[in-house]
Amino acid sequence: MRLGVDVMGGDHAPDAILKGCVQSIPDLGPRDELVLIGDGALIKDYLHDAGIADPRVKIAHTTEVIAMDDPPVEAVKTKKDSSIVKMALLGSHKPAVDEHLRCDAVVSAGNTGACVSAATMHMRRLPGVHRPGIAVTIPTFHGPVVLCDAGANPEPRSSHLAQYALMAEQLSAVIHKKASPRIGVMNIGAEDSKGTDLIQGTHAILKATPGIEYVGYVEGRDVFDSSCDVVVTDGLVGNMLLKTAEGFARSLINGIVREIMEADPDLMLRLEPILKHMFKKNDYHEHGGAPLLGVNGVCMIAHGSSEARSLRAALRQCRTFVRADLNHAITARIGELGEKMESVAVSMSNGG
Amino acid sequence: MRLGVDVMGGDHAPDAILKGCVQSIPDLGPRDELVLIGDGALIKDYLHDAGIADPRVKIAHTTEVIAMDDPPVEAVKTKKDSSIVKMALLGSHKPAVDEHLRCDAVVSAGNTGACVSAATMHMRRLPGVHRPGIAVTIPTFHGPVVLCDAGANPEPRSSHLAQYALMAEQLSAVIHKKASPRIGVMNIGAEDSKGTDLIQGTHAILKATPGIEYVGYVEGRDVFDSSCDVVVTDGLVGNMLLKTAEGFARSLINGIVREIMEADPDLMLRLEPILKHMFKKNDYHEHGGAPLLGVNGVCMIAHGSSEARSLRAALRQCRTFVRADLNHAITARIGELGEKMESVAVSMSNGG
């Protein structure tokens, strides 16, 4: 298996990314390869300094970098020799790609919008898929919940969200081994009258889709209550929810620690290892990235603030996704139900 | 001061609400009054059983109830003798209202949409205000952050959100005593290119508004990082964010407790009083309700799952709002900056 990494993308790139790549070398099998995509001289220097001379580590040299705050679509169009564009090409099935560098899966912690745009443009979509969506797995105490979309598609249609339900359902089934994943649509209440046209349209399509375990609307708190295994939402809301939850969790933990330190510092000493163990289990740095579902290939979006260990986790995750052949399952599911969904969407007044 | 309570609304109504009213009687001054709005016979029975015969407690009898899952606008139009509609009338300045029951502030834990709809219809809007918005104060370790809108207006325009910024700014200044409240617009990133037309339009209006402390876009995690004192968002997103954070917090705490119980049950015994103290400080049941800003009167929306103590806290909060005369400050601020904002909104392509 050949895995490609955009070493130029991320808040701590290229150092943290390269460090993560080096840490991942022990995970490679004898026939596996790692393609480091970015400034060739910089990568060579780093590998030299780290004492790495492994023939399984290859370099795909690029001369440009898409910055974290570049406008995504424009950047992908103008920076054709950027690491993100190269990554998408290497992860694609395009005939022009050098077969010795073609990757089974690619990872970037860079500009998310640019990754989505480049992957959509070069890797192309799976048959029948309208728009790729980012799926984030939220570890809850009742098991993993897959949220899609977490930011690929900020202004989707109902028919896009309905497809996200199917793709995330397959992720839940194939990767998390859920038997019949329960699907919910995020809304501000459980009543039919609640929500925007987008939400109500998605609800109508999923209600009319046979053979799925659709539980209807779910609210934010239900995500953590074992009400469903898959939550569908638009990319803007999904992204905000995840970041709010992240900020809130950090704030809450800091608050608890501060309160305990004030009341009983000795108690904190005893508590520390327990908390550390727990956070490690739920730390996104240990969980890797979020797959961009719906593209023809495996593209993993790592957190912008990825550290070396997050990158290593993302690479491990890539292997799982390639081995499980999730795309095969998604293509089959969209083939089975996609047209049915489409006809419901078209028959609706909002046009889906 | 006369305070009105919809005793029929809320998940635990009427019992928890009536219990909260009875618990609030000691908070009443000699010239204060409490108007219980709902089924008169039921209220009389409850007061009798509770041994309450206080002339300051009055009853406004109604024959209908708007259920938590009734479609709001329709319910307000058809159930004219419902406790929510009566509450809005009693909280209004309409001449038809019985002066002996007219309230300085009203509270409901019932159907939020119906409260917003009834209050907008009967209490009317403050001069210059386009749409009322629900403001929720989030207690963070850096101080209170006001989020508006939390669900009154699920499909707003940029000009509505810009006004929410001003109204929430005044709440932060008048109620939380912040000197120059910093205002942020919730988005999925800090870059100008991010977000929907709605978000970008709001950003443009606030950037062009003189005399406010506008800090630009904020992400979910910034809310807890002391980046701003006021966060503006549309009602749908705001509502989802709050409910997700609520569910996540509960899940996180349960997880911590479970982990500690497994590792060291004795430790939990020592930790319990510290955690309890901390949660009490941050418990929404102790913080009361969320004001509907922009209506001509004081209307407090209490949490649907309000218990007796949450209702009591909401009534205390009503007194604070009436005494501080927040509406005066809002009217002055909208008078000062509203037209300026309007002209920016109109000049924008999206029509504000």
Image (spheres, coloured by chain):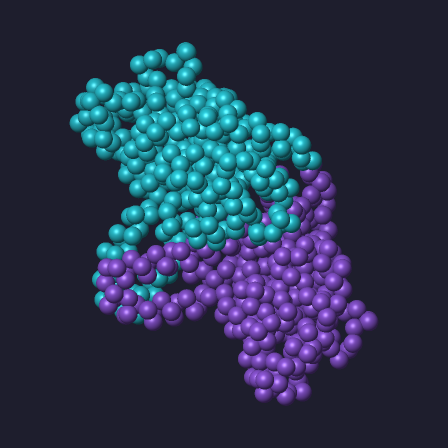
Chain colours: A purple, B cyan
The image position of residue B54, as x and y in percent, is 19, 22
Please tell me which residue lies in front, B307 or B277.
B277
Q: How many marks?
A: 0
Please tell me which residue lies in front, B59 or B270.
B270
Residue at image point 62% right, 60% down? A68
Q: Extreme right residue here? A: A96
For residue B34, side relative to residue B129 (left or right):
left
Taking A266 as reference, is A246 above or below it? above
For residue A98, side relative to residue A12 (left or right):
right
Q: Extreme front residue here? A: B211
The image position of residue A97, as x and y in percent, is 79, 73
Asked which quadrant contains residue A124, the reply is bottom right
The answer to whether one can see residue A14 in this image is yes
The answer to whether one can see residue A332 in this image is no
Taking A298 as reference, is A134 above or below it? above
For residue B230, side relative to residue A193 (left or right):
left
**Quadrant of the frame with the N terminus of chain B:** top left
The image position of residue B162, as x and y in percent, is 55, 35
The image position of residue B318, as x and y in percent, is 33, 30
**Quadrant of the frame with the C terminus of chain B:** top right
Q: Extreme top residue here? A: B96
Residue at image point 23% right, 59% down? A263
Taking B289 as reference, is A10 above or below it? below
Please tell me which residue lies in front, B285 or B308.
B285
Please tell me which residue lies in front, B254 or A207.
B254
Residue at image point 65% right, 30% down? B346
Residue at image point 62% right, 29% down? B343
